[in-house]
Amino acid sequence: MSTDTSATAAGQETIDGFQLVIDALKLNGVKNIYCVPGIPITDLSRKMQKEGLRVISFRHEQHAGNAASAEGFLTKLPGIALTVSAPGFLNGLTALANATTNCFPMILISGSSEREIVDLQQGDYEEMDQLAIAKPLCKAAFRVLHAEDIGVGIARAIRAAVSGRPGGVYLDLPAKLMPQEMPLAAGMASLIKVVDAAPAQIPSDESVQRAIELLKNAKRPLIILGKGAAYAQADSAVKDLIEMSGIPYLPMSMAKGLLPDTHAQCASAARSYVLAEADVVMLVGARLNWLLSHGKGKTWGGKTPANAAANRQFIQIDISPTEADSNVAIAAPVVGDIGSCVAQIAKGLKLGNAPKANAEWTKAVFDKRDANVAKMAITLEANPSPMNYQSSLAVIKKTMKAHPNTILVNEGANALDFTRSIVDMYQPRKRLDVGTWGIMGIGMGFAVAAAVTTGEQVLAVEGDSAFGFSGMEVETVCRYNLPVCIVIMNNNGIYKGTDKNLSGGADVAPTLFVKDARYDLMMQAFGGVGVTVRTPVELDAAIQAAFTSRKPTLINAVIDETAGTESGRITSLNPTAGKKS
Ligand code: OXT
Ligand code: ADP
Ligand code: MG
């Protein structure tokens, strides 16, 4: 219920646009606002705080936007970012587009300049036709011009963000909307509490039956879990299907931990083998995009796309009916929400007394996996000086095992790829990373949202380049005193610290940074804990101290500058890959 109301001359109580926005958000369960204040939303942010919303104010809108999208992924409710007009809006737009690409629900609310002046391009303060610019980059975009439409505008934004395939929504609130007044009773009646925003979508019986037939006849079945499966919060249904079928599964990066990575059926450590050999692959909330080599080619054991397609059949569980056949033929699309689809398939398999996955296949997969795990164990145990990715990440691996509730944020190239394969996750939705775009800059926004939304300890493992994209937000981490421990894998540059300037000139190569930079001092500047470590023992002690104190901490972990490879595990995507220089 609104508290900030006033009375007209006639004595009638009124409510203004500021208050209607706040009441509409609160009515729909919104608790946190991620923003950068300024004209025309400074007062809105103040009033939001006054009315009990938690307002987390950032240093740059991209990170506020990233925070909102991470909250969306973690909670299935749209995270809310709030920005000023034109430049602030544009700064937030990258996060909105990234959220849409990742299928995370969020709403970017931006104040905007006067419509009449913007449309005639008469040069208003921060003039920009924001709605038109946002539209192609997000799932839906709306503008509210009248106070009485605020309830509808926010309801439509929420529904668009979370229904069907989730994504980012833009909501344009012109400056003139905020002080508009209307009668209190009519204003309150205009607000909408959204009912069943993301209804269950039940798959058709035929589609479920088609999938079951394929699974029953498969000789070498594989299940791939994507971040859509993690998002769906259908954890026990997914676990049930996997365990009753006995089928090996491969988690995509942000699906790690949906079942513990140490699960007996996890095939992560035999990734190449299972992708190449599987004859029936069931995708659960995972797209056949670049991260899965589009379902084609060498990764999938075929020299040509045709060859690969001929040898393998796909089942795809997805809420988006247009996802099937986007890259290769999908023999059995199952369209619906993951919880409903997976439960129906499991039920059908049980009723049909489906046999457990072929023992010869599962033994081959798990033997391969165990051999790879044993091979990796040797590199993790080595203790080279200087420390490298493996010896430092062995410490993080141990930390996550001891503190499985911790939310791991991860970005970089080598810092990302080594962490993904070395550090086991034990619980769902505990890993947040660069996602579908492989985007740098999510680090601090995701870390802040993870801490604010869940109250859990956050551990951000960052390449030194990756950290730089959002590094100023360490002040935000300190200001809100969040339990965020940042570990910077400092190898003096992008990929490695040893690149040469090809011209022989005085400038360093484009991939290099200042050598031996003291990122820990940045944290100290804002009252947090900052330390430099050079050995796994020192790293371990610093992490333990951070976890015990829950103080904002930045650990500058100095690693071997020769240790990385160009682009980490995706060297082959460089345009010059394979070309002799
Ligand atoms: O089966 P095989 O034998 O193949 O082995 C696999 C697994 O089976 C095995 N494995 C295991 N073995 C044993 N035990 C366990 N537990 C285990 N688990 C797995 O290990 C291997 C590898 O497994 P993986 O990783 O699962 O498999 P693979 O083949 O790698 O998977 C393929 C992919 C594609 C799914 C995977 O590689 C993946 O998810 N990749 C994501 C890559 C990505 O997104 N990278 C980020 C972008 S790179 C680049 O663009 C960068 N930029 C440019 C830039 C960006 N991105 N954004 C913006 C806004 N501006 C610019 C920049 C600037 S990175 C970057 C900064 C880099 O520098 P930093 O300093 O930050 O970082 P450093 O590199 O550390 O210096
Ligand atoms: P990954 O990168 O982990 O492979 P993607 O982002 O490519 O995952 O795929 C996620 C997929 O999950 C998207 O196609 C999206 O439509 C789907 N999805 C998201 N939420 C649900 C849900 N609740 N039920 C079914 N599918 C979903
Ligand atoms: Mg680096």
Image (cartoon, rainbow, N blue to C red):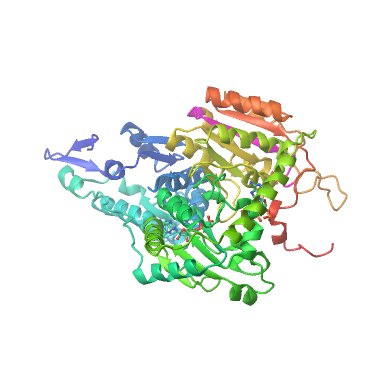
Q: Is residue 94 left or right of residue 10?
A: right
- Quick check: can you spot residue 109? no
| Residue 192 x, y percent position in the rendering | 24, 50
| Residue 280 x, y percent position in the rendering | 54, 67
In which image quadrant can residue 461 be found?
top right
- Quick check: can you spot residue 101? yes
| On-image quarter of the C terminus | bottom right
| Residue sitting at x 79%, y 48% | 509
How many numbered callouts? Answer: 0
| Residue 434 x, y percent position in the rendering | 57, 49
96 vs 396: above or below:
below
Tell whether position 531 is magenta.
Answer: no
Question: What range is drawn magenta here?
Answer: 479-495
342 vs 314: above or below:
above
Task: From the viewer's side, name the closer residue of 137 and 208.
Answer: 208
| Residue sitting at x 62%, y 34% | 398
Task: From the viewer's side, name the closer residue of 425 and 501.
Answer: 425
